[in-house]
Image (cartoon, rainbow, N blue to C red):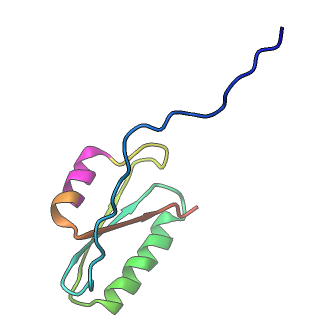
Amino acid sequence: MAVILDPVGQVRGGERQLNPRLNSLDGKTIGVIVNGQPNAPVVLGYVAELLQKDFPSAQIIIRTKPSYRNRAPEEILSEMSARAHVVITGLGA
């Protein structure tokens, strides 16, 4: 007898809303989380340099995750949540 499997998964949680965009990054604190990939410091460091050039009054905080395989440690997430107006991360692979 054949068994038929249903590959459709269950969606947990409800719909999520995006935070409103900032009008400008001038005077804001920008968090950058480097994910631990080998090229991530280069790529995200360059992004941070460009942002600092375009928004000289912005403060940039850069933190590095120990590994790209896991989420950022709670202390990094807490700091970014408390201090940053916006957070950028990326693979840098």
Our reading of the magenta stretch's main secondary structure is: helix
What's the residue at 52%, 60% (across, down)?
Answer: 91
What's the residue at 23%, 48% (across, down)?
Answer: 75
Is 55 placed left or right of 90 in the picture?
Answer: left
Number of numbered markers? 0
What's the residue at 40%, 48% (across, down)?
Answer: 66
Asked whether residue 77 is drawn in magenta, I would say yes
Residue 30 percent location from the top left of the image:
27, 73
What's the residue at 45%, 67% (across, down)?
Answer: 41
Q: Which quadrant of the rendered structure holds the N terminus?
A: top right
Q: Is residue 83 above or below residue 16?
A: below
Residue 26 percent location from the top left of the image:
23, 87
As drawn, which residue projects farthest toward the left?
A: 82
Asked whether residue 81 is drawn in magenta, I would say no
Over which residues does the magenta segment extend?
73-80
Residue 53 percent location from the top left of the image:
34, 91
